[in-house]
Image (spheres, rainbow, N blue to C red):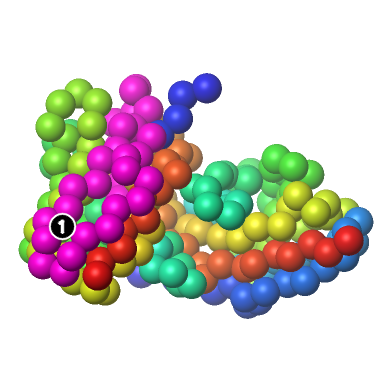
Amino acid sequence: AQSVTQLDSQVPVFEEAPVELRCNYSSSVSVYLFWYVQYPNQGLQLLLKYLSGSTLVKGINGFEAEFNKSQTSFHLRKPSVHISDTAEYFCAVSDLGNQGGKLIFGQGTELSVKP
Amino acid sequence: EPEVTQTPSHQVTQMGQEVILRCVPISNHLYFYWYRQILGQKVEFLVSFYNNEISEKSEIFDDQFSVERPDGSNFTLKIRSTKLEDSAMYFCASRVAGGNEQFFGPGTRLTVL
């Protein structure tokens, strides 16, 4: 069974500062990894995904994440955040061998960008 | 750009009543999902559906829940006898066969009184 841990429930940061949102996963099999963003009162939007290949993945809105197999981590980073990045961020895994492809989500990290 | 739609956006019901949450997945998608998010908690998988049958379900998805694709476009989640603890945001998602990205709808907020 897979599990996902997002180590920070809330991350306050000032505008234009860098940010890292941490995600660790546990799985006995190979997985796909995802980051989703949820803006207030909206659904989930895919930021980026890791399937295979290069461990550094670039996504939308200037976000990137690095897959680290030895540390079972997939931390999300952005070098300079904007007010509009204020949202809830969810890390998720999907079992490669699972044909249904269900997503297992972490608890979420609330990113709050202050002026 | 095609998107997943869900209706209603907010449903209020009395405990013990039946509710049906509706989703219209993206038209060429073949895998469908329901997830829920209790206020302040993480998003949880409920059920996946492919080729007109459930492919996987979670422990949450007990006999009170059912899913159906009644026609070529809708995908519904029925809760037969709602409980207070069913209050949550319910998300529908879909993906293409062979794909790995799930596209999510905006959600239906279910409030059970």
Count up the numbered dots. Answer: 1
Which residue corresponds to the image point at 25% horizontal and 40% vertical from the top-left?
A: B22
Query: Is residue B27 covered in magenta?
Result: yes
Of the pair A69 and A89, the residue shown nearer to us: A89
Above or below for A20 versus B72: below
Q: Which residue is at a point 83% across and 64% down the rendered structure image? A: A114
Residue B77 appears left or right of B111: left
Q: Position of residue B51 (x, y in %)?
A: 17, 34
Q: Which residue is mark 1?
A: B79
Residue at x-position 37% and y-position 55%: B109
Magenta stretch containing residue A4, yes or no?
A: no
The magenta span reads B5-34
In the rendering, at what x and y percent does residue B17 appear?
11, 61
Element assignment for label 1 = strand
Query: Could you say which quadrant of the image residue B63 lies in?
Result: bottom left
Q: Position of residue A44 (x, y in %)?
A: 51, 49
Question: Is the C terminus of chain B in the top left, top right, bottom left or bottom right quadrant?
Answer: bottom left
